[in-house]
Image: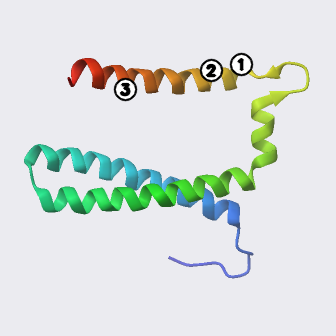
């Protein structure tokens, strides 16, 4: 893999690629943890849980940096001058709320 040294380091690209990479690791480790829990292999459960936690912390830090680097753009997603809050924002927030409520109901009703 060749690296180009004539372009300056881009913090936005670094954060974006870092967010994507950590998201992939979070998804994979979550799946692997579930598999090893079913197989009851304690060492790998512990190993992948620790990897998942540290990757989650890295994802959180990169998310904060992403928000800081893109604050003006993100503000535009949340509001317009005429309408106040955009429909897309309300829809995304409702989807998040429905997902959380579904998870809570699943744990309370199905896993009880």
Of badges 3 and 2, the one in the foreground is 3
The one of 93 and 73 positioned closer to us in this rendering: 93
Question: Which residue in the rendered view is the most extreme toward the right?
Answer: 81
Q: Earlier in the sequence, mark 1 or mark 3?
A: 1
Q: Are marks 3 and 2 in contact (CB under 8 Å)?
A: no
Residue 1, how many percent across, how many down?
A: 50, 76
In percent of the image, x 29 and y 26: which residue is there?
107
Q: Is residue 54 above or below residue 96?
A: below
Residue 26 shown left or right of residue 2 in the figure = left
Residue 7, how many percent across, how many down?
A: 74, 75
Is disc 1 placed on a helix, strand or loop? helix
Q: Report which residue position mark 3 lands on.
A: 103
Residue 43 shown left or right of residue 5 in the figure = left
Q: Based on the displayed image, in which of its 4 quarters is residue 5 positioned? A: bottom right
Residue 3, how many percent across, how many down?
A: 59, 78
Q: Based on the displayed image, in which of its 4 quarters is residue 112 positioned? A: top left
Q: Report which residue position mark 1 lands on.
A: 87
Q: Is residue 105 above or below residue 75?
A: above
Q: Report which residue position mark 2 lands on.
A: 91
Of badges 1 and 3, the one in the foreground is 3
Residue 106 shown left or right of residue 70 in the figure = left
Q: Based on the displayed image, in which of its 4 quarters is residue 42 positioned? A: bottom left
Is disc 3 placed on a helix, strand or loop? helix
């Amino acid at each position: 893999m060749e690296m180009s040294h004539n372009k300056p380091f881009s913090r936005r690209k670094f954060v974006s690629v870092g967010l994507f990479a950590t998201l992939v690791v979070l998804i994979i480790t979550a799946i692997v943890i579930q598999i090893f829990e079913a197989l009851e292999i304690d060492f790998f459960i512990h190993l992948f849980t620790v990897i998942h936690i540290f990757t989650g912390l890295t994802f959180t830090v990169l998310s904060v940096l992403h928000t800081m680097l893109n604050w003006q753009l993100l503000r535009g997603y949340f509001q317009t001058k005429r309408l106040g809050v955009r429909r897309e924002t309300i829809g995304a927030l409702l989807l998040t709320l429905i997902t959380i409520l579904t998870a809570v109901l699943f744990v309370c009703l199905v896993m009880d």
